Image (spheres, rainbow, N blue to C red):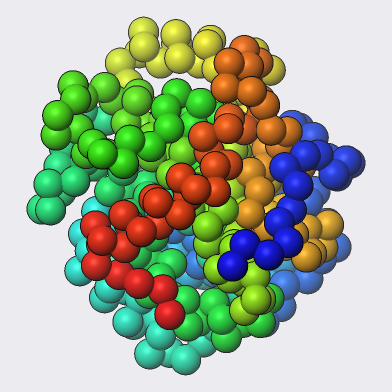
């Protein structure tokens, strides 16, 4: 199943940390293409929607808060707003059923929405909210939309991760903090590692069917994602993780858009990207801010997480 895998190392893309989403697209036209961008109405997601729409794509934006989505997306062309709450499995299924009923393909699925460092909250299944929203919600969504991705013949799935993956691997024996003490940053790191592992395993499954997957660290950007943090903690966190400075949303969306549209990545997949290039694989104890840690690119762990995720959600691909 794993086939030929793309090496986790820079391809010398020619871009960098200051590249914007519009610069990545350049003169590329996406007329007729259909994209789905979860959370595509605020922050990095909104800029992703804006860049894809400006290049001619039709962008479906599933949103938990419809009024906020309408306000954020006002004036953009070829944008459709849909109702979706990743924390509610029935909502995920309902959105996917509505989309599949339209008979349209999906050329780009950008799993962008997420929450960060929230207090302990459990969904109706008892699952920890960051893992349930950031990973399991998108796992279920992608599985339900799989027929539309296959129909596109060359689709890409972009999984928004974070440099936060370096905080924790995935504890498959206690992913939902039923036995260990809850730590909001460990929970966040675990969910972001899960995003990388999901892209790795998804790409292995999708390659033969023309569906490639990538995971992305957008960069440190001050958006609504930090709303759960007290001001002092926010300042300390920013200082700790942004030696290269904070990006604006135009720069933050660049790597997502690159993974979704760039011909530089044709024939590639399953890799973790940052600063509009494939990131370098680094050691577990690497002290620098960049790179992808070993536990996030562990194929065996990716397979075990996949199997567990099928069990947790009751959803299988294809």
Residue 276 against residue 262 in the figure, above or below: above
Q: Can I make out residue 49 in this image?
A: no
Q: Tell me where residue 92 appears, x and y as whole percent.
A: 29, 67
Instruction: Give the image quarter of residue 248.
Output: top right
Residue 11 against residue 169 in the figure, above or below: below
* Left/right of residue 53 with respect to residue 43 in the rendered view: right
Residue drawn at x 64%, y 23% as measured from the top left: 283
Q: Nearer the viewer, residue 295 or 135?
A: 295
Residue 21 against residue 260 in the figure, above or below: above
Q: Nearer the viewer, residue 245 or 240?
A: 240
Q: Can I make out residue 1 in this image?
A: yes
Q: Tell me where residue 251 appears, x and y as whole percent.
A: 68, 38
Q: Tell me where residue 287 appears, x and y as whole percent.
A: 62, 12
Residue drawn at x 57%, y 22% as measured from the top left: 284
Q: Tell me where residue 232 appears, x and y as whole percent.
A: 36, 8
In the rendered image, the quadrant that contains the C terminus is bottom left
* Left/right of residue 142 with respect to residue 246 in the rendered view: left
Instruction: Give the image quarter of residue 259.
Output: bottom right
Residue drawn at x 57%, y 86% as measured from the top left: 151
Residue drawn at x 44%, y 8% as measured from the top left: 236
């Amino acid at each position: 199943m794993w086939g030929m895998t793309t090496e986790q190392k820079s391809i010398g893309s020619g871009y960098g940390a200051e590249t914007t989403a519009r610069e990545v697209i350049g003169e590329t036209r996406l007329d007729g293409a259909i994209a789905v961008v979860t959370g595509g109405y605020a922050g990095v997601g909104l800029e992703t929607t804006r860049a894809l729409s400006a290049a001619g794509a039709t962008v479906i934006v599933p949103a938990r808060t419809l009024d906020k989505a309408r306000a954020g997306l006002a004036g953009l062309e070829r944008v459709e707003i849909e109702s979706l709450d990743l924390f509610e499995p029935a909502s995920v299924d309902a959105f996917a059923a509505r989309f599949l009923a339209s008979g349209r393909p999906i050329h780009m699925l950008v799993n962008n929405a997420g929450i960060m460092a929230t207090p302990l909250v459990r969904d109706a299944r008892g699952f920890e909210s960051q893992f349930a929203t950031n990973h399991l919600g998108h796992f279920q969504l992608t599985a339900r939309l799989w027929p539309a991705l296959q129909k596109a013949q060359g689709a890409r799935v972009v999984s928004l991760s974070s440099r936060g993956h370096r905080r924790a691997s995935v504890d498959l024996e206690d992913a939902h903090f039923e036995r260990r003490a809850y730590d909001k940053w460990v929970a966040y790191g675990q969910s972001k590692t899960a995003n990388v592992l999901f892209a790795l395993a998804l790409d292995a499954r999708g390659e033969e069917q023309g569906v490639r997957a990538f995971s992305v660290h957008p960069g440190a950007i001050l958006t609504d994602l930090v709303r759960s943090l007290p001001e002092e903690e926010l300042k300390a966190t920013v200082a700790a993780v942004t030696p290269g400075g904070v990006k604006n949303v135009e720069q933050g969306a660049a790597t997502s858009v690159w993974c979704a549209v760039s011909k530089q990545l044709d024939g590639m997949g399953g890799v973790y990207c940052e600063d509009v290039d494939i990131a370098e694989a680094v050691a577990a104890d690497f002290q620098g801010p960049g790179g992808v840690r070993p536990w996030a690119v562990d194929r065996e762990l990716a397979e075990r997480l996949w199997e567990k995720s099928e069990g947790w959600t009751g959803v299988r691909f294809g």
